[in-house]
Image (spheres, grey):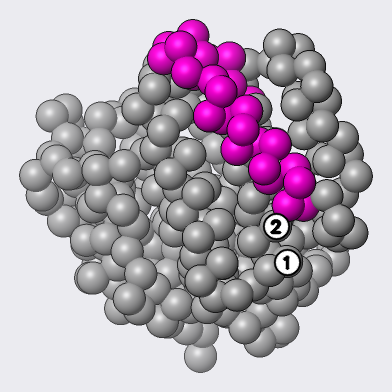
Amino acid sequence: MNKLISIIVPVYKIEPYIRQCIESILSQTYKNIEIILVDDGSPDNCGKICDEYAAIDDRIKVIHKKNGGLSEARNYGLKEAQGVYVSFIDGDDYVDKSFYQMLYEAAEKENCDIAECYSVNFEDGNIPQGSYRSGQTCLSPLEWLTESNVGDFLPCVVWNKIYKKTLFDGIEFPVGRHYEDEATTYKVVYKSSKIVRIKSALYFYRQRSGSITQLEKSIKEINEQYIALEEKCDFFRMKNEVKITKFAETKLAIYMISVYKIRKELTGEYKDWRKNIKKIFNDIYYESSIPLKYKIYLLMFIIFPNLCKKE
């Protein structure tokens, strides 16, 4: 018998999009699901829409709560989830009808704790096209946290995956902070035994004008992402995972370079970051597994800091 998958959807001020999101989940070819819609105190009609769907499909449960942010909404959903697997979908995104079927089959076939796929970014008004590609790759946590950590794949996001729910025992999303995915996903991956990545693109990520990810970063947002990445480095240092730590440091340095000019303009501070980036470069220089292109990128910044681009 197929195992239950709990799908957690935080809902806040996304009235134009929530129906598409819910409909995409209800149309899944994989049927053994529970859908937990967490109305995070949304001031529009989102709560009513969620209740409307709950009245017509008994797989849907709605939680109405005071606004506490995305992390708190996900944490509420985790406490209610009854599935063997758990998944997160942002309420303004949606998924291909085969999303859960393909991830579940891959996870079960390969005996993996996590299954993930590729995603498609799209803007309002566009109709994204997914892709079905055969083949998959199995990764150990070490491989995922190194090979993927600074590559083209987006390992920090939580929404393109299914997880064994037990992986979240003792782990919560940080309440009141941005970049909650970056601060959480690596801990869950590190607890897993194996991850399978399928080559299909089945998750549709909406890029909205005016959303958090589209606004120019404030110094608070810059610092919060910096803290999340620095915490990752500290986490793996404490675990004595030297190789993973060096990859985490590389990602931290790349991020610092990407927002260097913005931070300098907003705060006037730059010497401390240049010093830290140089320290990281010296630390990873002799690590043969770090791709050469990243070492060159850091070195070019150290020599010519004013040539770096804004993120």
Left or right, 31 with respect to 295, comes to left
> Where does the image place residue 43, in percent across and percent down from the top left?
13, 29
Left or right, 130 with respect to 53, comes to right
Write down the quadrant of residue 259 in the picture: top right
> Where does the image place residue 145, in percent across and percent down from the top left?
67, 63
Q: Looking at this view, name the residue that lies furthest to the left.
A: 66
Q: Is residue 120 visible?
A: no
- Judging by the rendered image, the residue that carries numbered circle 1 is 243
Is residue 293 positioned above or below 137 on the image? above
- Asked if the residue at tag 2 contacts the one at tag 1, i.e. Cβ–Cβ closer than 8 Å, the answer is yes
Mark number displayed over residue 246: 2
Check disc 1 and report its element: helix, strand or loop.
helix
In reply to whether residue 201 is colored magenta, the answer given is no
Nearer to us in this view, 42 or 303: 303
Amino acid carrying label 1: it is: Lys
**Are there few (<14), some (14-19), or many (20+) residues within 10 Å of tag 2?**
many
Check disc 2 and report its element: helix, strand or loop.
helix
Residue at position x 27%, y 60% in the image? 75
Write down the quadrant of residue 105 in the picture: bottom right
Residue at position x 77%, y 34% in the image? 298
Is residue 118 positioned above or below 100 on the image? above
- Tell me the magenta residue range: 258-284
Nearer to us in this view, 200 or 278: 278
Left or right, 197 with respect to 48, comes to right
